[in-house]
Image: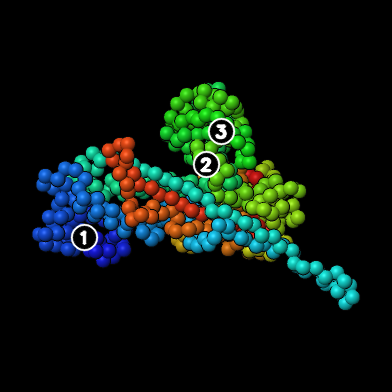
Amino acid sequence: MFNALKNLPGAIRRSPIRLALFAFGLLLILGGALIWSDIHQVLGGGAVMGVSASTKTTFAAFLKELYDGPEPTNVAIKNHAFFTLVPKKDKWVGDTWKVPVMFGNPMGRSRTFSKAQANVSASQSKAFKLDITKDYGVLTMDALAMAQSKGQAGAFAELKKSEYDGIIAELGNSISRSLFRKASGSIGRLKTGSATAVITLYNKTDTRHFQKDMVLVGSTADGGGAVKAGTVKVLSVQRQAGTVTLTGNYTAGIGTGADDDYLFVEGDYDLSIAGLAAWLPLTAPTGGDNHFGVDRSADPELLAGWRINNAARPIHENLIELGELIGTVSGGRPSHAFINHTKWTQMELELGDKVVRDPGMEAKVGFPSIKLFTSGGSFNVFAEPDCPEDRGYVLTMSSIMLRHLNPLPHVVDDDGNVEIRQSGDDGVEGRVRAWCNMAVFGPGRNGVCAL
């Protein structure tokens, strides 16, 4: 049956609509009483009650086929504009990724030859050295639930797919929010309520990063420090209110917890992707800066991007000024800008009848955008849910790369097994992971502004 499955067109193998009819589809294509007998067992026919060898083998092959190629990435990037549009490359050679940046030409130039010769100097360059980051997703499925689902056509396949799609989407959420943040891995900051079980976040929209049963740790530092002892667990999330309810008081779980703590998923501290907040900081780097081995204070704009810290101005004015700085001083050609959905709507209302939509771009990439104009050209502003509400980014996308190893993310089958039997429970365990990091090859062709 595995060979028959491999011969099916990719659209059939990967289409969620057809998955519910997976068993019957095989029957119609392959036909024959012998094949029907085997499929009948897979779907729970006759006296088969447990997870048979036939079932495990067939559906292991099914999962390998389903999540081979682009399917995991397609699930992970859904509804994430920047994650979808950023250039990607499936290649990582060696331990580190060396990213050279030229920020100054040779200075041996003068209208007087002897002076040009006397003042000769080399080009100015730096090289960022990036390590690969790791992100893991683990899921378990109960043996009884799997056995019971086999009695319904396609239900077993749907159970498997929904669980794998769920954990892949969660890794996608993790990657997408990381692309906008520092390598610290923070997902929000506690504003008030540390002595209670209901904590309020500084940015209401950060509640999208919290979910029931998530285990959190806290720190006074957004990276470069230490995690406080203890953990807390999320009971519920009140997204419109901008609050998170825990299973107990914050300070009961984290003894030294306090207002203003940064919050992290347990195990993430200082292990995340270096996102736009790391490459394009709102505060200019000063002496002693160390970004992947480079002190960017030698030229803060060309090595760490342009910045405008004036949240009182209209949103589109900040974005347009950034575009002008990038185009006229650095020679970049901004192509994209990203702001939070709330700010995108606010900008649309501010522009009123001056707003320019780009339906052609929306048809091409699947995300609505507003076109802004500068003296050097135009760029499209996209609404991005993972962009912090108080930041906006104007980017030359060709100067950014998300490099990864193997599909991003991918189902783990290193030993040929997609799933393993749980040692301490009656079920199976599946694993998904992502190996990647992001680099900005030309920081000076990009910028950040406060909103």
Q: Relative to 117, is 254 on the left or the right? A: left
Residue bearing the label numbered 1: 1
What's under tag 2, amino acid-wise?
Asp
Whichever of callouts 3 and 2 sits on the residue coming sooner in the sequence is 3
Classify 30 as above or below 349. Answer: below
Q: Position of residue 216 (x, y in %)?
A: 50, 34
Whichever of callouts 3 and 1 sits on the residue coming sooner in the sequence is 1
What's under tag 3, amino acid-wise?
Gly
Task: Please tell me which residue is depicted at 27% across the width and 38% down the height of the picture.
Answer: 426
Q: Position of residue 151 (x, y in %)?
A: 17, 45
Q: How dense is the environment of label 2, judged by Cα within 10 Å: few (below 14), some, or many (20 and up)?
A: some
Q: CA distance from mark 2 to mark 1?
A: 41 Å
In which quadrant of the rendered view does residue 390 lie?
top right
Q: Secondary structure beneath disc 2?
A: loop
Q: CA distance from mark 3 to mark 2?
A: 11 Å
Residue bearing the label numbered 2: 268
In which quadrant of the rendered view does residue 117 lie?
bottom right
- Give the mark count: 3
Residue bearing the label numbered 3: 218
Given residues 313 and 410, the one toward you in this image is 410
Q: CA distance from mark 3 to mark 1?
A: 50 Å
